[in-house]
Image (cartoon, coloured by chain):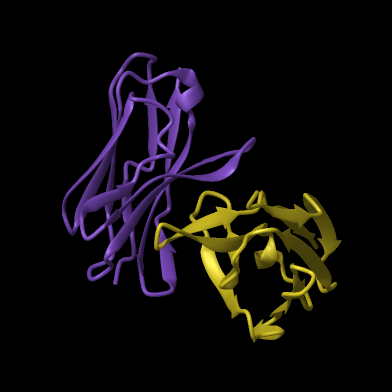
Chain colours: A purple, B yellow
Amino acid sequence: DAGVIQSPRHEVTEMGQEVTLRCKPISGHDYLFWYRQTMMRGLELLIYFNNNVPIDDSGMPEDRFSAKMPNASFSTLKIQPSEPRDSAVYFCASRTGYGYTFGSGTRLTVV
Amino acid sequence: KNQVEQSPQSLIILEGKNCTLQCNYTVSPFSNLRWYKQDTGRGPVSLTIMTFSENTKSNGRYTATLDADTKQSSLHITASQLSDSASYICVVPRIHFGNEKLTFGTGTRLTIIP
């Protein structure tokens, strides 16, 4: 099992550009979560899906953020347009039962 | 308000020494408490999951304790190794409209020096 796979590992983009982060959850996990981690605020939940359906997106900071899960093996988090304050590490995690497995994250830098 | 607070924020100890990290929570209702280890540049990895009825749980050199009455937990690391250098995050789930949402502490940054 390769675990939760995120891509890219690092992304540097200019303010105003569109950014797409990708996640492949562990096969068989029925929940998928997107988190953002910053030094100031720690880990924050952005949105989560259950069986590909968005359940709670109340953590998405603005309309500039959107997430999709078109099938059980793929999810994207899109930021359009990106701003410097979006710079953070974005984690995807999947879960079945009790156990959460996190990906290695995407470090996003918006300049 | 549902919160998880950790102390200290950072800790530096010599290799081979023991240390204890603290976690206080106000999340209610309580179902379980988790400790995660996060290496630099990696995602958090679960160390232990403790339910309401468990007071102590060990995972190798890591021992977690839980006092559900005072809403406190600790993570004790014995005979520290350089590879223990990481952030340790205390996590308490809460139930939100029938679904579980994790509440994260801000973590303790542990540095082991040779």
Q: Is residue A101 above or below residue B49?
A: above
In-image side of A66 versus B76 (left or right): left
- In which quadrant of the rendered view does residue B86 lie? bottom right
Residue at figure coordinates x 39%, y 26% from the top left: A62
In-image side of A85 versus B36 (left or right): left
Residue at figure coordinates x 63%, y 52% from the top left: B2
In the rendered image, residue B15, in percent from the top left (x then y), is placed at 81, 68
In the rendered image, residue B6, in percent from the top left (x then y), is placed at 74, 55
- In which quadrant of the rendered view does residue A5 lie? bottom left
Residue at figure coordinates x 85%, y 72% from the top left: B17
Q: Is residue A55 above or below residue A26?
A: above
In the rendered image, residue A90, in percent from the top left (x then y), is placed at 43, 42
- In which quadrant of the rendered view does residue B35 lie? bottom right
Q: Residue furthest left?
A: A71
Residue at figure coordinates x 71%, y 65% from the top left: B82
Q: Is residue B84 above or below residue A21?
A: below
In-image side of A30 versus A86 (left or right): left
Q: Quadrant of the C terminus of chain B?
A: bottom right
In the rendered image, residue A6, in percent from the top left (x then y), is placed at 32, 49
In-image side of A107 versus A77 (left or right): right
